[in-house]
Amino acid sequence: QVQLVESGGGLVQPGSSLTLSCATSGFRMDFYDIGWFRQAPGKEREGVSCISSIDGSTWYADGVKGRFTVSRDNTKNTVYLQMNSLKPEDTAIYYCAAPCNGLGFWGQGTQVTVSS
């Protein structure tokens, strides 16, 4: 069956870095744009980043541009989100989804907490 499994979350201090992974199975990941979303406590889920299946082009939300980098390895069926210079406002549950419009498959999420 289709699975997206996020990992790599944790508790870090402001200014730190984390790399999230989204391991996929049960579908042809190379056919899909893959997106990262996040949901902070008391807030709506928001799009963070997206990477194209066609040419690897990327999109980022304004609040993470220049700090986050999305990449994909189709040979490993995995998408990554490198997060640098983390801020307390980045605290959220992070989800990956295919495709990026969120109307397909979702993972269960991984918690990222940025706190001193």
Image: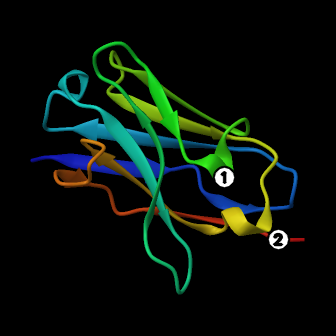
Closer to the camera in the image, 6 or 93? 93
Quick check: 85 above or below 52? below
The structure residue drawn at horizontal position 90% and vertical position 71%, both measured from the top left corner, is 116
Which residue carries the number 2 mark?
115
Q: Position of residue 2 (x, y in %)?
A: 14, 46
Which residue carries the number 1 mark?
63
| Callout count | 2
Closer to the camera in the image, 78 or 88? 88
Which numbered disc covers residue 76? none
Mark 1 vs 2: CB contact within 8 A: no
Q: Position of residue 40 (x, y in %)?
A: 56, 74
The structure residue drawn at horizontal position 58% and vertical position 49%, both measured from the top left corner, is 8
Quick check: 97 above or below 59? below
| In this picture, residue 37 sits left or right of residue 25 | right
Q: CA distance from mark 1 to mark 2?
A: 18 Å
Task: Give the secondary structure at mark 1.
Answer: helix
Instruction: Look at label 2 and name its amino acid.
Output: Ser
Quick check: 32 above or below 8? above
Task: Give the secondary structure at mark 2.
Answer: loop
For this orientation, the residue located farthest to the bottom is 42
Q: Say few, some or many: other residues with alpha carbon within 10 Å of mark 2 (under 14 / 14 to 19 / 20 or more).
A: some
